[in-house]
Amino acid sequence: MIDDIIDPRIDQWYWEPKSDRSFTVLDYDEDEGIIEIQYFDGELDELDIDEWREMALEEVEQPEDWTGPIDKLEADDLGYDEV
């Protein structure tokens, strides 16, 4: 078990060194102990709280291009002005 356990927080981004992947928490059901995550490439996964606690996670900033995992966005969906 890892000494510095980070609690899962919805919309927070994390990096897991073992897999060298970053992901965000989409949902955390504390009663069931289930954490839904989405990797930057769009892949969805589900972890139980025991798996989470075994991971050596680091909180990281949201990626600069956080739209990577999101399909079919238009520029105006993000509030960008058209150039």
Image (cartoon, rainbow, N blue to C red):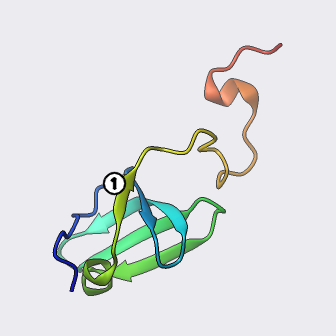
User: Residue at position x 49%, y 62% from top?
Assistant: 23
Left or right of residue 48, residue 24 in this image: right
Residue at the far right: name it: 83
Tell me if residue 58 comes above or below residue 4 in the rendering.
above
Q: Amino acid at mark 1?
A: Ile
Q: Nearer the viewer, residue 18 or 81?
A: 18
Tell me if residue 72 comes above or below residue 21 in the rendering.
above
Q: Identify the image quadrant of the C terminus.
A: top right
Tell me if residue 17 comes above or below residue 70 in the rendering.
below
User: Residue at position x 28%, y 63% from top?
Assistant: 8
Q: Position of residue 46 (x, y in %)?
A: 44, 78
User: Residue at position x 59%, y 44% from top?
Assistant: 66
Q: Quadrant of residue 59?
A: bottom left
Q: Identify the image quadrant of the N terminus.
A: bottom left
Q: Nearer the viewer, residue 69 or 16?
A: 16
Left or right of residue 30, residue 13 in this image: right
Q: Position of residue 20 (x, y in %)?
A: 54, 70
Task: Name the residue that disc number 1 marks.
Answer: 10
Count all numbered tags in the image, as a single digit.
Answer: 1
Q: Position of residue 72 (x, y in %)?
A: 76, 46
Disc 1 secondary structure class: loop
Tell me if residue 65 comes above or below residue 14 in the rendering.
above
Q: Position of residue 71 (x, y in %)?
A: 72, 51
Q: Residues within 10 Å of mark 1 (few under 14, many from 20)?
A: some
